[in-house]
């Protein structure tokens, strides 16, 4: 596939812009109550749809409908609070961005000490990936020096994204990073981070 000079120039301009943004903005730590505010905004509300029962069921069906709606709200709240069936997280990391202070989020580790562990990434105000690029999620084990391991990639379809990725194996994870990677580029970290966080 041939890339014309205008596309090549645009790729280079995007890369330079990302590098400049990454170097110029300070790392901002989100407020301590950020996760609680996120949960408060995403908790679902039940909507009870009016139902016209037959005359002999007038008392029973509204009561059953209310009980079912309350049960649904309770079930959704339990699922939201326990990680969607993943249980209690082993550790959490507040995710913030040097280049885009509006971008915030959280990473949560589930089952990190055993095979089959998961990292759940929840991001808000994610900008579209630059043309010809995508975002990649990396984790760093405490005993790995600076060797980060890729756990998956994504191209956002909206400004908010929540997804689960498999961990590369059991470990004591220290940090998470979201990098900007060129489509079809080398497998190593590009050294251009969109956002990152430290597990605690």
Image: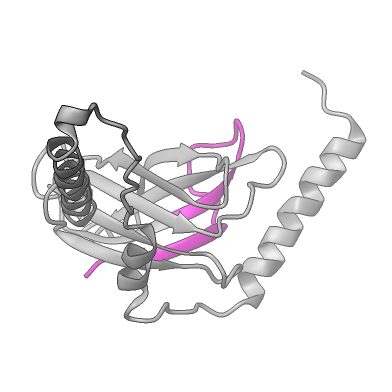
Q: Residue sitting at 12 percent across and 47 percent down?
A: 111
Q: Quadrant of the C terminus?
A: bottom left
Q: Is residue 133 left or right of residue 75?
A: right
Residue 4 lies, in percent from the top left, at 89, 30
Residue 31 lies, in percent from the top left, at 39, 81
Residue 83 lies, in percent from the top left, at 21, 50
Q: Residue sitting at 31 percent across and 45 percent down?
A: 48
Up/down of 12 relative to 37, above or below: above
> Is residue 198 something that shows in the picture?
no
Q: Residue sitting at 46 percent across and 39 percent down?
A: 153
> Is residue 71 something that shows in the picture?
yes
Q: Residue sitting at 57 percent across and 57 percent down?
A: 192
Magenta highlight range = 178-200
Q: Is residue 112 left or right of residue 162?
A: left
Q: Is residue 33 magenta?
A: no
Q: Is residue 188 magenta?
A: yes
Q: Where is residue 133, by image quadrant?
A: top right
Outermost residue to the front: 55
């Amino acid at each position: 596939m041939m890339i014309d000079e205008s596309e090549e120039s645009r790729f280079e301009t995007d890369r330079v812009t990302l590098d400049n943004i990454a170097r110029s903005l300070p790392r901002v730590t989100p407020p301590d109550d950020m996760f609680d505010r996120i949960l408060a905004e995403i908790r679902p509300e039940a909507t009870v749809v009016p139902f016209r029962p037959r005359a002999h069921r007038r008392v029973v069906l509204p009561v059953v409908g209310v009980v079912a709606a309350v049960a649904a709200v309770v079930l959704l709240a339990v699922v939201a609070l326990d990680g969607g069936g993943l249980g209690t997280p082993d550790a959490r990391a507040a995710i913030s961005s040097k280049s885009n202070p509006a971008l915030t989020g959280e990473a949560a580790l589930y089952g990190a000490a055993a095979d089959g562990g998961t990292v759940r990434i929840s991001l808000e105000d994610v900008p579209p990936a630059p043309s010809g690029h995508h975002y990649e999620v990396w984790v760093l084990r405490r005993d790995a020096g600076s060797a980060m391991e890729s756990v998956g990639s994504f191209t956002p379809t909206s400004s908010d994204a929540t997804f689960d990725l498999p961990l590369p194996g059991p470990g004591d994870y220290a940090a998470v990073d979201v990098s900007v990677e060129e489509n079809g580029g080398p497998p190593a970290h590009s050294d251009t981070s969109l956002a990152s966080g430290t597990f605690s």
